[in-house]
Image (spheres, grey):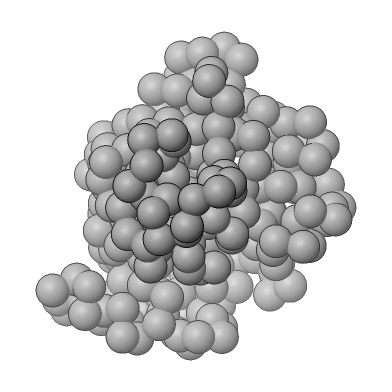
Amino acid sequence: MKILGIIPARFNSTRFPGKPLVMINDKPMIEHVWNGVKGTGLVDRVVVATEDKRIVDAVQAFGGEAVMTSKLHKTGTDRCGEAIQKIGDDINDYDVVINIQGDEPKVAAEHIKLVVKAFEDPNAQIVTLKKKITSLAELNSTNTVKVVCATNGDALYFSRQPLPYMRGIAKEMWLRKRVCSYYKHIGIYAFRREVLQQVVQLPQTPLEKCESLEQLRWMENGYRITVRETTKESVAIDIPEDLLKLK
């Protein structure tokens, strides 16, 4: 199985402009992400997909590969879709494409291993991860996306609201009860190459618009999302203050 890793990196972030080029230990953030993905030894080729030439120049300066994409993409997956078009016929050499977040300078090798291993199942189409929620603040935050799964590990639904609803029990007790566990979504996606080529052609759907979650578009169109559990936390840099997490 041959793996392509794509790192979407947008310069014009609303909450943190220029984020991919912020310096961390004398290297731009995007270099940390690229090195982390390459360092796993699981990804055959790594490409940064961006809308800004400054990021392309920075990636090429440290010996990485980058492609220019449109400024109009609403999601990282859509940016990955254009990137595989730019790669051309060589894309047919790859079985799986992994979309790795460009704002996670401490890429977890465990996350990449888990999604790659899931494709040993020939029926896997899209793979992502979940981690158990352990705090009420995380459970109640609309910035934390929750996922509920079937017994076979497939996603049933993603939401910004706590799911499932525990009827008859005060919300502050939900994490203490043994009825069920709550899980947050870890935002790494891996696709069969042909599935990625299909989903980026889909128009937005009602559920996606309601929750602002692109994975609901795929589910509404009948695609299967396999979810594997990790105990490893991700460290996303959304705003400048998040850089303190790295310490």
Q: Is residue 140 visible?
A: yes
Q: Quadrant of residue 193?
A: top right
Residue at left offset 37%, top offset 42%:
177
x and y, in percent, of residue 93 in the image: 56, 27
x and y, in percent, of residue 138 in the image: 40, 63
Residue at left offset 39%, top offset 22%:
117
Q: Nearer the viewer, residue 2 or 222?
A: 222
Indicate left or right for 127 with 181 as reference.
right
Indicate left or right for 88 with 226 as reference.
right
Q: Quadrant of the N terminus?
A: top left
Residue 113's place in the image compared with 60, above or below, is: above
Residue, far front:
168
x and y, in percent, of residue 105 in the image: 29, 63
Q: How many marks?
A: 0
Q: Is residue 193 visible?
A: no
Indicate left or right for 16 with 148 as reference.
left
x and y, in percent, of residue 153 in the image: 51, 25
Q: Quadrant of the C terminus?
A: bottom left
Q: Nearer the viewer, residue 114 or 87?
A: 114
Residue 33's place in the image compared with 238, above or below, is: above
Q: Nearer the viewer, residue 214 or 32?
A: 214
Residue at left offset 33%, top offset 47%:
176
Q: Nearer the viewer, residue 149 or 115?
A: 149
